[in-house]
Image (tube, helix red, strand yellow):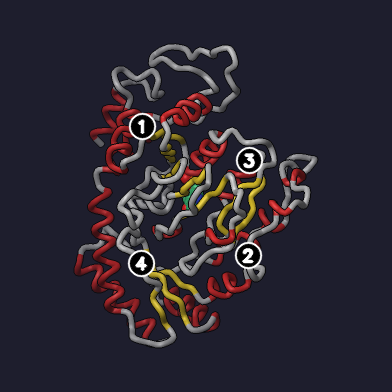
Amino acid sequence: MHELRSAVDDKSLFRYISSGVSVSSRLEELVEERLGATRALAVHNGTEALRLALMGTRPCAGDPVYIPAVTFVAVAGAVLSCGLVPVPVDVDERFGLDSALLPADAQRVIVAHMEGMVGPLPQDVPYLIEDSAQAMGGRHADGRHAGTVGYAGTFSFHHAKVLTSGEGGLVVVRDPDDWEVLRSYHDHGSDREHGKYPVWREGAFYGENFCANEAVAAVQLQQFRHLDEILASLERHHAILAEELPDRSDIRRVVRTGGDVKVSVRIELGSRELRDRALADLTDRGLACWTLDKYFLPEHPVVRDRVSVYADGFPWNLDDGAQRYRPRSRDGFRATREALGRTLCLPLAPELDETGQTQAAKEVAAALAAL
Ligand SMILES: *Cc1c(COP(=O)(O)O)cnc(C)c1O
């Protein structure tokens, strides 16, 4: 409340009018320091962050953007709303984009660290965007933070994410020159001096308004102070549930690396039928669980049916059938579809204390043992 109250007391919730350094700027500085990012920019949500990162690549209309076959539909939507064409790429065992399937000349690739699972990154892609909406605070094997390795990284503060302000987003970039382009685009293509009306240089490009709100930034600033605590609690809870899981040959726990954000324990069951039974049983007992079926983009209406609000079907109509627009999979996504059908996620609650975590783990384990 302290951060929020002082933002409101300042009587100017627009970041470029605030007296002194804006809360949004303080948030960005904190993020740069905490995540080891070159520059950060606050926006309204994770989808906008993706759009902004894509626009910052200065694409041509209709360029393909390679995206994981398993991710939230916002990734496809962000690509399309930039006038670009999303091309699904099949995923590996942990449902991260399989780099081996990318064309050698891929220019734009989005990887998504789903459920905090920080996956390996493709090499030598000029514009690699790490969608870290579900992996705030996660780390790669070399210790660098998820989101900071590629050209850009995006984050969300939506209600369901690791940190939340209801809605909120953030983009980080490695190159400070890219940050200037993003900053300008997110503020109507302007140059901006704090406290003044924006100015447009000769040759300014058009932009949009993605400028963060000071009250929301204040909540995010406060949330960030809890990040380490939340990550540690998830880590502990994950270890407790992993330990309690029944030892059954038809329930395999998907291994998580040290750098993953442990938002859930992910299990793969022996068959789809058993998975569906587990889902129904746990739900009946009031135990939280979910599947990842909703993230399978090749069968998502938005990607499958290729409908657009534009009368001419833009930008889908820019797909001329060339090789670069072909979905990338070895088997038409069959193995992925089947693996998703056997997968169940057991979410972890960082707010529980150790006793609560142990109790919750025992209930879930008992339900799985009784299947
Ligand atoms: C939530 C999410 C987004 C979109 O973020 P919003 O803040 O809801 O717009 C994008 N990608 C992934 C992987 C997400 O989970």
The residue identified by callout 4 is 256
Mark in front: 1 vs 4:
4
The amino acid sitting under disc 3 is Ser
Residue at 39% in and 53% down: 135
What's the CA distance linking mark 2 and mark 3? 24 Å
Mark in front: 3 vs 1:
3
Q: Which mark is residue 215?
A: 1
- Considering the numbered disc 2 on the image, is that residue within a helix, a strand or a loop? loop
Image: 291 above or below 143? below
Callout 2 touching callout 3 (CB < 8 Å)? no
Relative to 31, 67 lies left or right: right
The amino acid sitting under disc 1 is Ala
Relative to 39, 74 lies left or right: right
Q: Which mark is residue 329?
A: 2
Q: Residue furthest right?
A: 312
The amino acid sitting under disc 4 is Arg
- Within-10-Å neighbours for mark 4: few <14, some 14–19, many 20+: some
Mark in front: 3 vs 4:
4
> What is the x, y in percent for residue 251?
42, 82
